[in-house]
Amino acid sequence: MRVIITNHAKKRLKDFRQDKIYLSDIKNAVQGIPGQIPIATRFRGFMSGSGRIFDIVVKDISTGRLVITIIGK
């Protein structure tokens, strides 16, 4: 499955709340979500390799799975 991360989501990774959350953490989290996601949906409680908890908002589009934003805890 192709994972597409928006520029907005990449920009948020530079914020303090998303510190130590990496693109590889996001890709692993997104690929672990089963089924189809026809509308933007927030998924909670993922853990980065550094131990940081985060949520993601994801939607399936024709070219893959789109990561709209990341919310660090």
Image: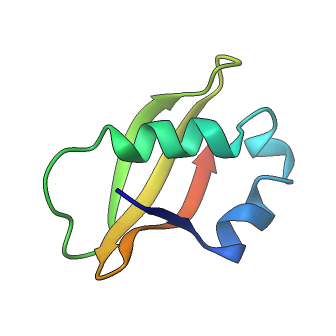
Where does residue 72 sit, x and y in percent of width and height?
64, 42
Query: In this figure, what is the number of numbered marks?
Result: 0
Residue extending furthest toward the bottom = 62
Snapshot quadrant of residue 38? bottom left
In this view, 43 is above or below 20:
below
Q: Which residue is at 59% across, 51% downward?
A: 71
Q: Is residue 73 visible?
A: no
In this view, 1 is above or below 4:
above
Snapshot quadrant of residue 33? top left
Q: Looking at the rendering, in which quadrant would you find the N terminus?
A: bottom left
Position of residue 2 in the picture relative to residue 22 (left or right): left
Where does residue 57 sit, x and y in percent of width and height?
43, 61
Q: Which residue is at 61% across, 73% downward?
A: 6
In this view, 20 is above or below 57:
above
Q: Is residue 15 visible?
A: yes
Q: Which residue is at 47% across, 37% downward?
A: 28
Where does residue 65 sit, x and y in percent of width and height?
37, 65
Q: Tell me which colouring the rendered structure shows.
A: rainbow
Position of residue 66 in the picture relative to residue 7 (left or right): left
Residue extending furthest toward the left = 35
Q: Which residue is at 71% across, 37% downward?
A: 21
Q: Looking at the rendering, in which quadrant would you find the C terminus?
A: top right
